Image: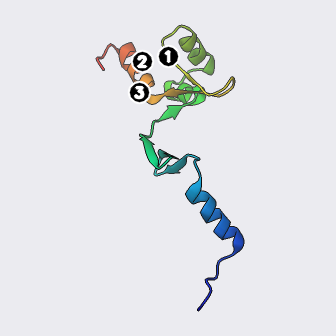
Amino acid sequence: MAAESCSPSSFLLSVRRSFSDEPVRKNRVLIIRHMNKRIVSPPEELLSRRAIAARWQCSVETIKRTEKAGLLRALRFNSRLLRYKLADVIAYENAAAGQKE
């Protein structure tokens, strides 16, 4: 009977991964495993203030003022980290251009 050549640390990692309840990201889709259920969320494009400012060729302060005026909604992850949905940014751009969504 031949023993498999598997180091203890790699075996523990494989066991830990298979029984973990932590979210796993595959192909830019979040998969959450909990009690043999899989919840799959579609990937969503999120932009920072700096990315939107570069897209609109304006300052970051302009993006802050747009948010403060209630024209653009931010997703706040904590007190310092926030992102904007690309769909919301495009909707605002279309509204500013006078187009329908």
Q: Is residue 65 above or below residue 89?
A: above
Q: Name the amino acid, label 1.
A: Leu
Q: Name the amino acid, label 3.
A: Ala
Residue 54's image quarter?
A: top right
SS at mark 1?
loop
SS at mark 3?
helix
* Labels in figure, total: 3
Q: Given the current orientation, which residue lies at the most extreme left position?
A: 100
Contact between labelled residues 1 and 3, with CB atoms less than 8 Å apart: no
Contact between labelled residues 2 and 1, with CB atoms less than 8 Å apart: yes
Residue 41's image quarter?
A: top left
Which residue occupies 57% across, 48% down? Answer: 21
> Where's the N terminus, which quadrant?
bottom right
Residue 72: which numbered mark, if any?
1
Which residue occupies 59% across, 47% down? Answer: 22
Q: Name the amino acid, label 2.
A: Tyr
Expressed as whole percent of the image width and height from the top left, the position of residue 71 reads 48, 12
Q: CA distance from mark 3 to mark 2?
A: 9 Å
Q: Disc 3 or disc 2, which is closer to the eye?
A: 3
SS at mark 2?
helix
Residue 98's image quarter?
A: top left
Instruction: Answer with left or right where residue 1 lies relative to residue 37.
Output: right
Q: Is residue 66 above or below residue 84?
A: above
Expressed as whole percent of the image width and height from the top left, the position of residue 100 reads 28, 17
Q: Is residue 95 above or below residue 50?
A: above
Name the residue that disc number 2 marks: 92
Pick whichever of labels 3 and 1 is earlier in the sequence: 1
